[in-house]
Amino acid sequence: MKVSVIGLGYLGATHAVAMAKSGHQVIGIEPNPEKVAMLQSGRAGFFEPGLDQALAEQIAAGRLTFQIAHDESSRLVDVHFICVGTPQTKGSLAADTSYLHAAISDLAPYLREDALVAGKSTVPVGTAAILTKELGAATGFSEPNLAWNPEFLREGTALEDSLRPDRLVVGVTNKRSEELLRQVFEPMIASGIPFLVTDLATAELVKAAANAFLATKISFINAMAEIAEVSGADASQLAKAIGYDERIGNKFLRNGVGFGGGCLPKDIRALMARAEELGVGESVAYLKEIDKINIRRRDRVIALLESELGSLSEKRILILGAAFKPDSDDIRDSPALEIALLAQKAGAEVIVHDPVSLPGVLIKHPELSVQEDLTKAFESVDAVVLATEWKEYRDLDPQMVSVLTANKLIIDGRNVLDVAKWQQAGFRVLALGRTIQN
Ligand SMILES: NC(=O)c1ccc[n+]([C@@H]2O[C@H](COP(=O)([O-])OP(=O)(O)OC[C@H]3O[C@@H](n4cnc5c(N)ncnc54)[C@H](O)[C@@H]3O)[C@@H](O)[C@H]2O)c1
């Protein structure tokens, strides 16, 4: 089939490659000319394991091209996937859907009446119905084919998740849209991946609900961590113990510095804002607490540092990690970066290390000092905070860095370190949600 992917960020670039790998002919549309040039050269422009190689292969195979705007070639497309951003609106909890409206009006002059527009962005429930009306007005079609197909990929395993998702959810208003989506996802459906057909509102809400549930699970265990910290209990053992119950499950149940990234924080806020607009704000008012618990974990790290070092003024603090999770360079709403900024605000001299995201850190936060060399980063520091659980940090030999540090103190913000190993190298180890005997 002929497919277009509109908006080539983390979601769109990955989806474009996944569609090409599924055998479709794909046109990627992205208004940022620098991004288009980068993609044409076989680089996604962000770190995602395996993506650049797959991208280069699909370009070489002639299945994937990129351009900055629609042209006559868009008329040949059967399914247009919309993957533009829906960030949090400044000064409000609501999602900014303006990029979607722009994408619809850019596409309308080139849309064939029998083609399908399938939104993949995460949107407030009700958005697809509004976009369908806009599309009808712009094209003159009495029943434009517009569907919603939310995306569940996780950064770090994005390509694999796009090719082999847990499930495919499609919200449709007519049989033609369903048929086109069945065709486009045929290889995945044939391999046994569940294919759920719903109405538009359900498909939109599935994504918001999934992210609200995941955020709740993380903040739940972090709330238990707060109780553990004042009662002498161990939240990591507690998580393990309750996780054996299949109804609870152990995934997304590790206590630490909390969630971040370009999705969970903004998605729970957008759900609260939309529920409020719909007159049922109380239904998800609890998400306000979920958000607050999450933010408090970042403050807890600063409190731990101050309890050990006194004032942070002129103390040298190394933050291990800047990305919101390992195997990604995404620093949007990253707990690690927020901890670095909070420590700096408290007067510390902060050094940030991250295996891949430092270029992005320097652009967004030139006020922070970065160190690319992991060993050198430990030089003369008064404390280390492990804030993103990169494998490099878990595997690091503490003996190698022990002599370099001025004061051997490490806070395990993700509860992943081999405590005995770090203690043998002379470090005092502190962690979130548990008291460690040093
Ligand atoms: N990143 C993820 O892991 C992930 C996972 C699932 C869902 N989502 C959702 O997918 C959407 C996109 O997220 P992202 O992380 O890829 O965002 P992003 O900011 O990385 O990418 C969005 C892209 O859309 C482009 N764009 C903006 N206006 C456009 C227009 N009119 N036409 C074409 N392109 C346009 C931007 O230039 C940018 O490259 C969001 O709704 C997000 O919530 C993201």
Image (tube, grey):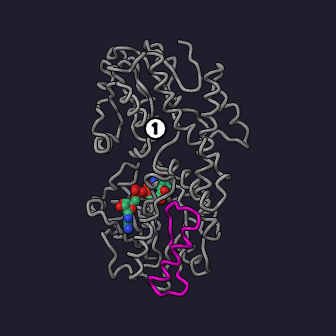
Residue that appears at 42% across and 46% down? 332
* Residue 142 as seen in the image, left or right of residue 248: left
Q: Label 1 belongs to which residue?
A: 335
Residue that appears at 29% across and 43% down? 359
* Residue 120 as seen in the image, left or right of residue 342: right
Instruction: Determine which quarter of the picture holds residue 55.
Output: bottom left
User: In the image, is residue 119 part of the stretch drawn in magenta?
Assistant: yes
Instruction: Determine which quarter of the picture holds residue 305.
Output: top left
Question: Where residue 135 appears, x then y in whole percent?
Answer: 48, 79
Q: Nearer the viewer, residue 400 or 67?
A: 67
- Could you tell me which secondary element the residue under label 1 belongs to? helix
Residue that appears at 60% across and 23% down? 229
Residue 301 higher or lower than 361, as above or below: above
* Residue 352 as seen in the image, left or right of residue 419: left
Mark 1 residue's CB less than 8 Å from ligand 1: no
Q: Nearer the viewer, residue 281 or 117?
A: 281
Range covered by the magenta-colored residues: 118-144
Question: Where residue 421 appears, x then y in whole percent?
Answer: 48, 18
Residue that appears at 32% across and 66% down? 31
Q: Quadrant of ligand 1?
A: bottom left
Amino acid at circle 1: Pro
Residue 363 higher or lower than 228, as above or below: below
Question: Where residue 187 appears, x then y in whole percent?
Answer: 54, 67
User: In the image, is residue 377 part of the stretch drawn in magenta?
Assistant: no
Crowding around mark 1 (Cα neighbors within 10 Å: few <14, some 14 to 19, many 20+) is: many
Confirm whether residue 159 shows in the render.
Answer: no
